[in-house]
């Protein structure tokens, strides 16, 4: 047990002069009677009531002592404990190019990907997770963290148009590698989700895949978009957005090559349900045993002491008004 205000325990020293005052007071208040001898009273002993009178003073002393302890705020000690759990380092690399607004998913690819990613993050309690977004350029949205609330809030707040348009898959993968390569977990993986093919950027996708392989990072690639035609957003002559059916073009060969090179796996998501099942499969694949340190908060533990002080005061009050009641 520890105390939030241990200096208050010095108040226990006031009990010493209080005891001295009680002894002095008892001697001054007792009436005296001069007699020639006390032999007739030698065998009478001390009455039980007389002993109780002194015990009441003891109860008061204990009550004061416990009140001082309450003021010092006794607390339970903070503790660290280590538990074994499953965890890994993961980076979510999300394509936010304008083609992700295609409505072959409900409500569209972009929102469907965000919803599934948020649920995935919420279920990974012991992992370090980061978020990278890419379109015509790439950007680290959230560094590696275990803060689930911050990750989910940011994923939900991602908006189209945050980056220049186009699709730089290689740059998105390279940024993800830079963010995860120094992690301490034995298992490191990147989940890269895109609906197109690499058409801009500085780093080629295959080059980025070789770098990931060098660092022992698995890359799970997801091509999002149904087969055939899909309604894509297009601007008409009046500057308004209309949806026009266009062919779905995903560079599956490159995405498969990235996954194969790094020891990951390629998935094709053709609707919301398939996308959700893909993330469930990745969730089961990416598990590794790690030690996690858990912290227990400090809690006040003064209530038992306060109850004890109250009981002692009540006991003295009841006794002085019943069996130890005195007549003035």
Image (tube, helix red, strand yellow):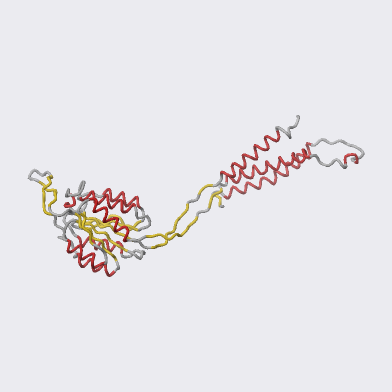
**Where's residue 249, x and y in %?**
14, 57
Which quarter of the picture shows residue 190?
A: bottom left
The residue that appears at 62% across and 39% down in the rendered structure is 310
Instruction: For residue 140, say whether it is visible.
Output: no
Instruction: For residue 156, say whether it is visible.
Output: yes
Q: Is residue 164 left or right of residue 116?
A: left
Q: Residue furthest right?
A: 36
Figure quadrant of the C terminus: top right
**Where's residue 187, x and y in %?**
33, 64
Q: Residue furthest top?
A: 328
Q: Is residue 106 left or right of residue 292?
A: left
**Where's residue 19, x and y in %?**
71, 44
Nearer-the-camera pick, 146 or 6: 146
The residue that appears at 67% across and 43% down in the rendered structure is 61
**Where's residue 83, x and y in %?**
44, 59
Callout count: 0
Nearer-the-camera pick, 250 or 56: 250
Q: Is residue 95 left or right of residue 245?
A: right
Q: Residue furthest bottom?
A: 214
The residue that appears at 23% across and 64% down in the rendered structure is 259
Nearer-the-camera pick, 4 or 216: 216
Which quarter of the picture shows residue 318?
A: top right
């Amino acid at each position: 047990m520890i105390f939030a205000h241990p200096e208050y325990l010095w108040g226990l020293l006031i009990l010493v002069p209080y005891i001295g005052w009680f002894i002095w007071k008892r001697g001054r208040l007792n009436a005296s009677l001069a007699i020639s001898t006390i032999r007739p009273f030698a065998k009478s002993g001390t009455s039980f009531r007389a002993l109780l009178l002194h015990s009441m003073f003891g109860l008061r002393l204990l009550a004061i002592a416990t009140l001082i302890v309450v003021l010092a705020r006794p607390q339970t000690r903070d503790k660290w404990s280590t538990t074994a759990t499953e965890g890994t380092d993961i980076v979510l690399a999300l394509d936010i190019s304008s083609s992700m607004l295609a409505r072959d998913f409900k409500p569209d690819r972009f929102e469907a990907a965000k919803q599934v990613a948020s649920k995935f993050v919420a279920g990974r309690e012991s992992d370090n997770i980061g978020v990278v977004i890419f379109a015509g350029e790439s950007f680290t949205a959230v560094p590696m963290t275990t803060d689930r609330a911050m990750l989910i809030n940011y994923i939900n707040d991602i908006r189209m148009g945050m980056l220049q348009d186009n699709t730089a898959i290689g740059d998105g993968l390279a940024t993800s590698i830079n963010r995860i390569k120094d992690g301490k977990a034995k298992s490191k993986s990147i989940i890269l989700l895109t609906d197109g093919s690499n058409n801009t950027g500085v780093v080629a996708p295959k080059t980025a895949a070789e770098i990931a392989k060098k660092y022992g990072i698995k890359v799970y690639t997801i091509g999002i978009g149904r087969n055939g035609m899909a309604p894509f957003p297009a601007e008409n002559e009046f500057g308004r957005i209309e949806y026009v059916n266009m062919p779905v073009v995903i560079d599956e060969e490159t995405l498969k090559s990235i996954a194969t090179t790094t020891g990951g796996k390629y998935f094709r998501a053709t609707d919301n349900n398939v996308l959700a099942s893909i993330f469930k499969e990745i969730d089961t694949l990416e598990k590794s045993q790690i030690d996690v340190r858990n912290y227990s908060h400090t809690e006040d533990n003064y209530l038992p002491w306060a109850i004890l002080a109250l009981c002692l005061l009540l006991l003295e009050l009841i006794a002085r008004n019943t069996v130890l009641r005195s007549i003035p």
